[in-house]
Image (cartoon, grey):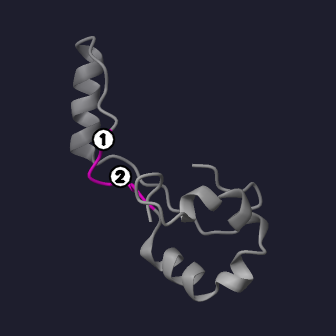
Amino acid sequence: MDWHDGCKCFIISILKTPDELKLDTDRILNGKSTNSQSVNSVDGIPVGLISYVSSNIDFCSKQDWYKQNLKYFSKDPDKYFW
């Protein structure tokens, strides 16, 4: 994703589960590619952020972080997620 450099968001690293890591390790040891999917994968913008932006669009639309990531806030479901 193309989030802005000056992000002040609180970030929690989301890793694969121990079982997923074990399967990936076994794949590597057997010369196979790892699986990039995880039950912890985040495939879209959090609902709370979408709600905040929608409720504060006049303010958000003037912010650099919004302008730089406009494609992620598109309402065109075929183009980007919403």
- Is 11 on the left or on the right of 69, as rendered? left
Query: At 47% from the left edge and 55% from the top edge, which residue is drawn?
Result: 80
Packing grade of label 2 (10 A; few <14, some 14-19, many >=20) is few
Query: At 39% from the left edge and 49% from the top edge, which residue is drawn?
Result: 15
Depth order, front residue of 61/18? 61
Q: Position of residue 56 (x, y in %)?
A: 64, 86
Q: Position of residue 33 (x, y in %)?
A: 31, 20
Q: Quadrant of residue 7?
A: bottom right
Please name the residue that numbered disc 1 is placed on: 37
Residue numbers of the magenta segment: 37-44
Query: At 73% from the left edge and 63% from the top edge, which residue is drawn?
Result: 67
Q: Is residue 31 positioned above or below 79 on the image?
A: above
Q: Specify whether residue 49 is painted magenta.
A: no
Q: Is residue 49 positioned above or below 2 on the image?
A: below
Residue type (three-letter) at the residue carrying disc 1: Gln
Query: At 44% from the left edge and 66% from the top edge, which residue is drawn?
Result: 82
Q: Is residue 4 positioned above or below 64 on the image?
A: above
Please name the residue that numbered disc 2 is placed on: 41
Check contact, mark 1 vs mark 2: CB within 8 A.
yes
